């Protein structure tokens, strides 16, 4: 998926989708953006700043985001890193009281099919690192 072939993506606030993170480079397409299409079954559309409690939560559910996986170019995440999360996993974390903060400007509007904007706003942080 390239920028030239795709229409501009919108964020949950209705504006242009901002980048989530380039270090480490995140997104289903590893382009720094939390955008999705039919190939992304996990809907990686929520830009979150991961926390220790969230990393433990997702690891307990079989998705270890802390351990480096060099064979996939994945450095492993540490608390404070930003990462595009699956909307359903973020929602599960919210329901369990361990959802990490989010960057609304970098969450694709598709997230709203899973999580209402008012809930996302409760976890909002500024887009600037």
Image (cartoon, rainbow, N blue to C red):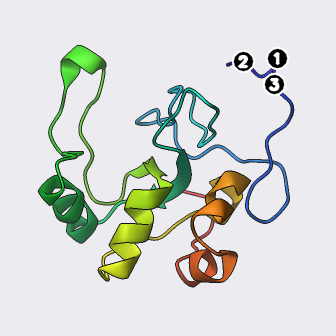
Alpha carbon distance from label 2 to label 3: 6 Å
| Mark 3 vs 1: CB contact within 8 A | yes
| Mark 1 vs 2: CB contact within 8 A | yes
Write down the quadrant of residue 98 in the picture: bottom left
CA neighbours of label 1 inside 10 A, class few (<14), some (14 to 19), many (20+): few
Q: Position of residue 78 (x, y in %)?
A: 25, 52
Image quadrant where one finds the N terminus: top right
Question: Does 122 sit left or right of 13 as displayed?
Answer: left
Q: Which residue is mark 3?
A: 6
Marking on residue 2: 2
| Above or below, 25 relative to 71 | below
Alpha carbon distance from label 1 to label 2: 6 Å
Question: Does 128 sit left or right of 60 as displayed?
Answer: right
Q: Position of residue 83 (x, y in %)?
A: 44, 48
| Mark 2 vs 3: CB contact within 8 A | yes
Q: Which residue is mark 1?
A: 5
CA neighbours of label 3 inside 10 A, class few (<14), some (14 to 19), many (20+): few
Residue 57 showing in the rendered view = yes
CA neighbours of label 2 inside 10 A, class few (<14), some (14 to 19), many (20+): few
Alpha carbon distance from label 3 to label 1: 4 Å
Element assignment for label 3: loop
Q: Position of residue 80 (x, y in %)?
A: 35, 59
Element assignment for label 2: loop
Image quadrant where one finds the C terminus: bottom right
């Amino acid at each position: 998926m390239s920028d030239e072939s795709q229409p501009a993506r919108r964020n949950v606030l209705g504006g242009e989708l901002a980048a989530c993170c380039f270090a480490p480079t995140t997104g289903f397409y590893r382009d720094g953006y939390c955008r999705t299409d039919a190939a992304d079954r996990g809907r990686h559309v929520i830009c979150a700043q991961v926390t220790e409690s969230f990393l433990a939560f997702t690891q307990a559910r079989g998705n270890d985001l802390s351990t480096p996986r060099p064979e996939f170019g994945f450095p492993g995440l540490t608390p404070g890193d930003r990462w595009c999360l699956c909307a359903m996993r973020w929602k599960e974390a919210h329901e369990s009281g361990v959802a990490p903060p989010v960057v609304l400007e970098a969450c694709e509007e598709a997230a709203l099919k899973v999580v209402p904007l008012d809930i996302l706003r409760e976890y909002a942080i500024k887009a600037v690192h």
